[in-house]
Image: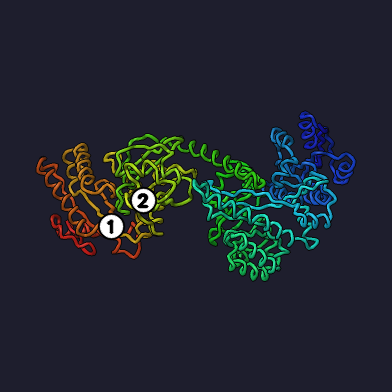
C-alpha cells in the first residue's frame, strides 16, 4: 500500500500542529506549511495524497489556492478547514468540486479529531466504480492521450457503447425509465471517462455523430425492453417508461439532428413522448432566446425536455418560467451532501417547490443512501436516480437489476407493513365506512381494503364476502401493488392472467376488478382498496379518480392516530376526527360532482339532566343519543360529537326523500326510548340540515354555519316535531 502523505496549509501554527498530531497518530506522514509559496513548492516536490487547507490565509486565500489546484489537476484528497461560517465552507466546497477537485469533507474549526480521521479513511473512487458508472471524477487517474481521431474512429466502429442507469418513482420505487450513458473501453488505454471523450467530441465537431450513435443503440433496446415489460406479469408500467438521453448545448441549433432522431424513433417504434432530452442548465441558458425557439419546437414535436444539473448555473427564475421544460433535475452536488449540509437541503427544497409551481416534475440524481431518499420523499420529489437505486449497467444486466430491485422493495414493503402492526387486527369503523362508501358509489356487490404480506392477502375491511384472506399468489391485488395507479380487469374470464383463477371460476366469481394501491406514510405499497363485480364492467376516468380518492382516505386513516380522533365517551368521532374526514369527503364530492348533506343536532336538555341528576346521568344521555344516531344513519355516513351536546352527521348522495325517512326513523327511535324511561331523562333534540347545493363551493365551515342557523331558526319557531324538511331553506324538527 502506498504511503499516505498529508500536506497542511494553515497560517495558525497551533492548528497545524494539532492536525499533524491527529494525522500522525493515524499513521500518515505530515508536512505543515503556513504560506502559499511553501505549500505549492511541497506540492510539486513531495506529492501529497491528502491536503488540509484553511480558507483564511494572509497572502493567498483558500479559494485562490483551490483554483490553482484545479488548474494543476491535483488528484489528492482535500479537506477544507476554517473558522468561517458553515455556509461559506459549503460554498467553497462546491466551488472546489466544480474545479474537478476531490473534496472529501469540510471541517469547521474547532474540529473534532474523530471527524478528521473518518475523512482521511474515506475510500477513493476505484476503477471499477468508474467503469460501472462514471459518476465520479477521473481527476485521480492519469488522463490517457486520446485524440480527436481516436474518438472519430470509436464512433465509426461503434466502440462507444451504452450503460443504462435506472430511474424510479421517489415515493413508490416503481421503475420510471432509464438514462442512457455513453461508455468507452479503449483497447490500449482502458476505460475512458465520458467527460474526456465527450469534451473532445464537442471540440472537434463530432458531438452530433456521437449523439446519433447513442440514439441508434438506445432506441432498439428501449423498444424491446418495453415490449418485454408489457407481458404479464407486469413488472413496470411499460407504456409510461422514459428513456433519457443527454444533448450537448452545441447540438441544440442543429435541427437536422433532431429530424434524424425523430426518424430513428419512428423506425424503432418509440413514441417521441417516451424520450427525455436532457440539457445542462448552463447550456440551455447560453443563448436563451435561441434556446426558447428550439426547445419549443422540440416540445411541439413531442419530445420531453429535462434541465440537467439544475442549481449549478445562474439562470434566472424568469428564464426557467419561459423555457418549455417538463422536468427539472437537481444536481447531484446538492443531493450527495444533503445529509451534511443545511444549505443543500434548502436548495433542494426550493428547487422542488419552484418546479412544482411551474407544473414540472423533479428528479434528484446522486442518491447514495436510504436517508437521502427518505428526505426527498418527504419533500415530494417525483423521481430518484443514483447508486442507491442502481448503478449504470450494460443492457444485458438490466434484468438482473430488476430482480434485485423487486426483492429489495418487497423486503422494505414487508418491514413497513409489520411496523404499522395493522395486519390481523379487529374490524374498525373508520375503514368499514370507506368500503361501504365504495360499495354505494360504484354500485358493486363487493368492496375491500386489503393488506398483503409475503404469503397472504388479508382483508382489513370487507363488504360482500365471508372470507377473511386468500393466498397472495391468486390475489388480483398482488398485481395492483405493482402499479403506480389503478389496476383494472374489465372481464377476468377473457384475461389470460385470471381466466383460470380460483376466485374467478369459484366463489366469489370475480368478473370485474378495479383496485388502487394504498401506501404507508413512508411510501411503501401495503395493499389496495378495490371494488369487485360478478359481471364485466368498465371504468371511466371519473371512476378511476374516485377510486384514487378512496385510496387516499385509507392512507390517511393508516397515518392517523385514531386515539386523537375519537370521542372517548361516545366512541364517535371528535371534532378533530370529524373535520379531518369530512374535508376529504367533501373534496371527493366536489371532484365527482356528488351532493353532500350536513345535519347538525343539539341535545336540548343535556344541561338540565347534567345539572339536576349529575354527570353520570348526563353522560348516559349522551351515550344513548349517540347510540341512536349510530343505529339510524348508514355505516358510510360520518357521525361526530363536536361539542358538549352537539352532534353532526355528513351524508353523501342522499336524496331528499331518503333524508326525511331517516330523520323520521330517528324521531321514532327517540320516542320509543323516551317511552321506556323516566321523564327526567327523556331526550329532547333539535336539528338543522343543509346541502352542498346551497353553497358556491364545498366548504365545511359554510355547511356548519347554514345547518346551525337552520337549527336555531327552528328552535325560535318552536318547530321541534315537524318533519316537513325543506333542504334549501328552513329544515325543521
Give the vertical position of 721 relative to 607 (above or below). Answer: below
Q: Are marks 2 and 1 in contact (CB under 8 Å)?
A: no
The answer to whether residue 74 of the structure is visible from this angle is no
Residue sitting at x 13%, y 49%:
668
Quarter of the image that includes the C terminus: bottom left
Query: In the rendered structure, which disc, 2 or 1, sits on the residue that comes first in sequence?
Result: 2
Task: Determine the image quadrant of residue 298.
Answer: bottom right
Q: Which mark is residue 701?
A: none
Q: Is residue 525 visible?
A: yes
Q: Quadrant of residue 22?
A: top right
**Disc marking residue 653:** 1
Q: Position of residue 399 (x, y in %)?
A: 60, 44
Q: Is residue 91 above or below residue 564?
A: below
Quadrant showing the N terminus: top right
Residue at x 15%, y 57% (from the top left corner): 723
In what element is the residue under mark 1? loop
Name the foreground residue: 342 vs 84. Answer: 342
Q: Residue at x 74, y 47 (%)?
A: 137
Residue 424 percent coordinates (x, y): 37, 34
Q: How is the image coloured?
A: rainbow
Disc 1 packing (10 Å; few <14; some 14–19; many ≥20): some
- Residue 696, percent from left and from top: 34, 65
Query: Which label belongs to residue 512?
Result: 2
100 with respect to 415 (left or right): right
Which circle, 2 or 1, is nearer the viewer?
2
> Horizontal placement of 95 versus 550: left or right?
right
What is the distance, in whole Å, between disc 2 and disc 1 at their CAs? 24 Å
| Rendered position, 303 above or below 604 | below
Q: Residue 315: x percent and y percent? A: 66, 62
Query: Is disc 2 surrounded by few (<14), some (14 to 19) or many (20+) residues within 10 Å?
Result: many
Amino acid at each position: 500500500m502506498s504511503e499516505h502523505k498529508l500536506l497542511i496549509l494553515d497560517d495558525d501554527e497551533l492548528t497545524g500542529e494539532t492536525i499533524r498530531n491527529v494525522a500522525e497518530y493515524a499513521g500518515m506522514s505530515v508536512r505543515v506549511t503556513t504560506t502559499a509559496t511553501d505549500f505549492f513548492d511541497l506540492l510539486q516536490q513531495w506529492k501529497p495524497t491528502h491536503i488540509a487547507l484553511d480558507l483564511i490565509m494572509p497572502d493567498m486565500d483558500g479559494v485562490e489556492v483551490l483554483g490553482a489546484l484545479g488548474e494543476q489537476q491535483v488528484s489528492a484528497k482535500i479537506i477544507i478547514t476554517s473558522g468561517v461560517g458553515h455556509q461559506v465552507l459549503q460554498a467553497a466546497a462546491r466551488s472546489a468540486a466544480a474545479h474537478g477537485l476531490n473534496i472529501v469533507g469540510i471541517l469547521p474549526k474547532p474540529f473534532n479529531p474523530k471527524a478528521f480521521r473518518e475523512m482521511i479513511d474515506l475510500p477513493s473512487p476505484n476503477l471499477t466504480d468508474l467503469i460501472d458508472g462514471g459518476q465520479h471524477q477521473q481527476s485521480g487517474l492519469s488522463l490517457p492521450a486520446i485524440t480527436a481521431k481516436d474518438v472519430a474512429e470509436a464512433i465509426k466502429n461503434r466502440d462507444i457503447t451504452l450503460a443504462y442507469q435506472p430511474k424510479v418513482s421517489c415515493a413508490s420505487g416503481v421503475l420510471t425509465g432509464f438514462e442512457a450513458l455513453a461508455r468507452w473501453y479503449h483497447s490500449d488505454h482502458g476505460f475512458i471517462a465520458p467527460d474526456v471523450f465527450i469534451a473532445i467530441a464537442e471540440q472537434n465537431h463530432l458531438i452530433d455523430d456521437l449523439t446519433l450513435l447513442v440514439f441508434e443503440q438506445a432506441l432498439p433496446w428501449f423498444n424491446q425492453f418495453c415490449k418485454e415489460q408489457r407481458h404479464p406479469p407486469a413488472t413496470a408500467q411499460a407504456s409510461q417508461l422514459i428513456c433519457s438521453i443527454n444533448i450537448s448545448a452545441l447540438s441544440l441549433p442543429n435541427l437536422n439532428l433532431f429530424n434524424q432522431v425523430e426518424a430513428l424513433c419512428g423506425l424503432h417504434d418509440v413514441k417521441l413522448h417516451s424520450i427525455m432530452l436532457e440539457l445542462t442548465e448552463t447550456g440551455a441558458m447560453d443563448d436563451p432566446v435561441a434556446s426558447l425557439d428550439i426547445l419549443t419546437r422540440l416540445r411541439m414535436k413531442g419530445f420531453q425536455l429535462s434541465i440537467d444539473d439544475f442549481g449549478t448555473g445562474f439562470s434566472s427564475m424568469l428564464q426557467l418560467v419561459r423555457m418549455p421544460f417538463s422536468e427539472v433535475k437537481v444536481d447531484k452536488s446538492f443531493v450527495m451532501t444533503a445529509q451534511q449540509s443545511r444549505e443543500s437541503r434548502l436548495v433542494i427544497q426550493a428547487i422542488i417547490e419552484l418546479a412544482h409551481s411551474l407544473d414540472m416534475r423533479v428528479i434528484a440524481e446522486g442518491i447514495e443512501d436510504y436517508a437521502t431518499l427518505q428526505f426527498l420523499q418527504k419533500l415530494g420529489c417525483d423521481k430518484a436516480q443514483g447508486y442507491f437505486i442502481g448503478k449504470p449497467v450494460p443492457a444485458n444486466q438490466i434484468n438482473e437489476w430488476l430482480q434485485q430491485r423487486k426483492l429489495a422493495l418487497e423486503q422494505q414493503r414487508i418491514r413497513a407493513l409489520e411496523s404499522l402492526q395493522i395486519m390481523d387486527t379487529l374490524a374498525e369503523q373508520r375503514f368499514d365506512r370507506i368500503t361501504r362508501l365504495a360499495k354505494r358509489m360504484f354500485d358493486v356487490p363487493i368492496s375491500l381494503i386489503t393488506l398483503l404480506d409475503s404469503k397472504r392477502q388479508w382483508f382489513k375491511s370487507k363488504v360482500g364476502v365471508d372470507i377473511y384472506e386468500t393466498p397472495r399468489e391468486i390475489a388480483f391485488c398482488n398485481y395492483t401493488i405493482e402499479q403506480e395507479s389503478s389496476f383494472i380487469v374489465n372481464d377476468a374470464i377473457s384475461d389470460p392472467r385470471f381466466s383460470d383463477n380460483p376466485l374467478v371460476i369459484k366463489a366469489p366469481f370475480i368478473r370485474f376488478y378495479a383496485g388502487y394501491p394504498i401506501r404507508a406514510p413512508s411510501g411503501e405499497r401495503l395493499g389496495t382498496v378495490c371494488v369487485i363485480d360478478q359481471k364485466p364492467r368498465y371504468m371511466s376516468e371519473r371512476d378511476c379518480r374516485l377510486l384514487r380518492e378512496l385510496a387516499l382516505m385509507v392512507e390517511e386513516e393508516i397515518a392517523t392516530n385514531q386515539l386523537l380522533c375519537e370521542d372517548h365517551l361516545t366512541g364517535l368521532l371528535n371534532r378533530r376526527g370529524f373535520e379531518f374526514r369530512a374535508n376529504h369527503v367533501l373534496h371527493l364530492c366536489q371532484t365527482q360532482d356528488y351532493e353532500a348533506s350536513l345535519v347538525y343536532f343539539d341535545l336540548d336538555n343535556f344541561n338540565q339532566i347534567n345539572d339536576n341528576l349529575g354527570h353520570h346521568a348526563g353522560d348516559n344521555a349522551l351515550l344513548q343519543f349517540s347510540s341512536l344516531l349510530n343505529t339510524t344513519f348508514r355505516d358510510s355516513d360520518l357521525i361526530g360529537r363536536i361539542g358538549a351536546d352537539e352532534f353532526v352527521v355528513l351524508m353523501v348522495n342522499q336524496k331528499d326523500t331518503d333524508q326525511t325517512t331517516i330523520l323520521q326513523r330517528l324521531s321514532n327511535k327517540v320516542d320509543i326510548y323516551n317511552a321506556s324511561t323516566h321523564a327526567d331523562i327523556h331526550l329532547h333534540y333539535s336539528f338543522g340540515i343543509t346541502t352542498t347545493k346551497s353553497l358556491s363551493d364545498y366548504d365545511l365551515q359554510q355547511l356548519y354555519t347554514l345547518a346551525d342557523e337552520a337549527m336555531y331558526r327552528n328552535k325560535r319557531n318552536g318547530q321541534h316535531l315537524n318533519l316537513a324538511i325543506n333542504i334549501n331553506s328552513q329544515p325543521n324538527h
